[in-house]
Image (cartoon, rainbow, N blue to C red):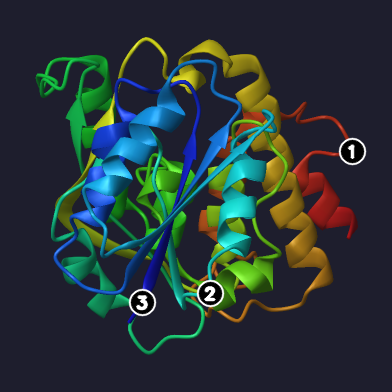
Amino acid sequence: MRVGVVIPSYNHQKYVGDAVRSVLNQSIDGVELVVIDDGSKDDSASVIRDAFREYPDRKTALVEQENAGAHAAIMRGVEMLDTEVVAILNSDDAYERDRFERALPSIDGQRHALAFTGLHLFDGDGRPLSADRDWPRWYGQALGAIDTEPTIGFALLVQNFSVTSGNFLFTRALYDQLGGFGDQQFAHDWDFLIRSLWYTEPVFIAEKLMSYRVHDANTTDRVRSLLKSECGGTVQRYIEMCQSLGMPTNQLAPHPEHWPWFFDRFIDSRATFWDTNNSTHPLNVLANG
């Protein structure tokens, strides 16, 4: 099974070489890599080319473009691939060498499929984060949703412990079915994940097969207000899918007819996204649907 990886790269010359090597050093054959340098102002492109030269037998491509945002960079990269499975990797993160060897069997033979794995959490200098830091504490709590929610899909709605689009491994057929990533600046990963639930139940592989870097430049720490707005819009769109598309292909998908109590509880748990007295609140929309 061939896997195509897209790295959207932006101003990460310190890290992007390791990200590239972690893809090209995978233990399986048939791995292809496209890097979209999204208008970096540093020396990222040269670092990427140097890393490519270390793996002459791997299929690689680098595209340099004006800054268009992560979602646009990802989609341009995916369109350059013709592999049946696609993965994303942020330019400051890295895969474990056996990530694909361990994860691919979980989606083999499925048309619409998405998988993700456990994560190692590191700081900007590559040091593991201690358990008492904010990120590891949150991540541990988020994983607890696996035991409190009825499905992995619901657990991801309540606590997005996939963390990043760089943790996604999905079939090209699913990507095409969804029409790719949305145009959100920061929540495009969660939007893609939630819409995926309509067609497939995600697979969580608990092994820590990826390293996620937490540092001062992590985008989400600087844009909480916009992220909140985008997340609200994402859930709103999923509610509209529930109204307009009938019953999901995935029989475990969050849906008011599948899981009425859990579904209402999830919507209420996101009350800060909406004014609960407003007609656009999802529960009011469903009631008036």
Residue under the point 23% across and 45% down = 21
Contact (CB < 8 A) between labels 2 and 3? no
Kind of residue at badge 1: Ser
Q: Whole-percent x and y of residue 153? A: 45, 60
Secondary structure of the residue carrying tag 1 is loop
- Are there few (<14), some (14-19), or many (20+) residues within 10 Å of tag 2? few
Kind of residue at badge 3: Arg
- Mark 1 or mark 3, which is nearer the start of the sequence? 3
Mark sitting on residue 2? 3
Residue under the point 90% across and 55% down = 288
Residue under the point 64% across and 52% down = 76
Secondary structure of the residue carrying tag 2 is loop
- The quarter of the image holding the C terminus is bottom right
Q: From this view, report whether residue 193 is shown above or below residue 178.
A: above
Secondary structure of the residue carrying tag 3 is loop
Q: Quadrant of residue 1?
A: bottom left
Of the two numbered discs 1 and 2 in the rendering, the one whose residue sits closer to the viewer:
2
Kind of residue at badge 2: Asp
Mark sitting on residue 279? 1
- Mark 2 or mark 1, which is nearer the start of the sequence? 2
- Mark 3 or mark 2, which is nearer the start of the sequence? 3
Whole-Å distance between the Cαs marked 2 and 3?
Answer: 9 Å
Mark 2 sits on what residue?
82
Contact (CB < 8 A) between labels 1 and 2? no
Q: From this view, report whether residue 260 is shown above or below residue 163.
A: below
Is residue 254 visible in the rendered structure shown here? no
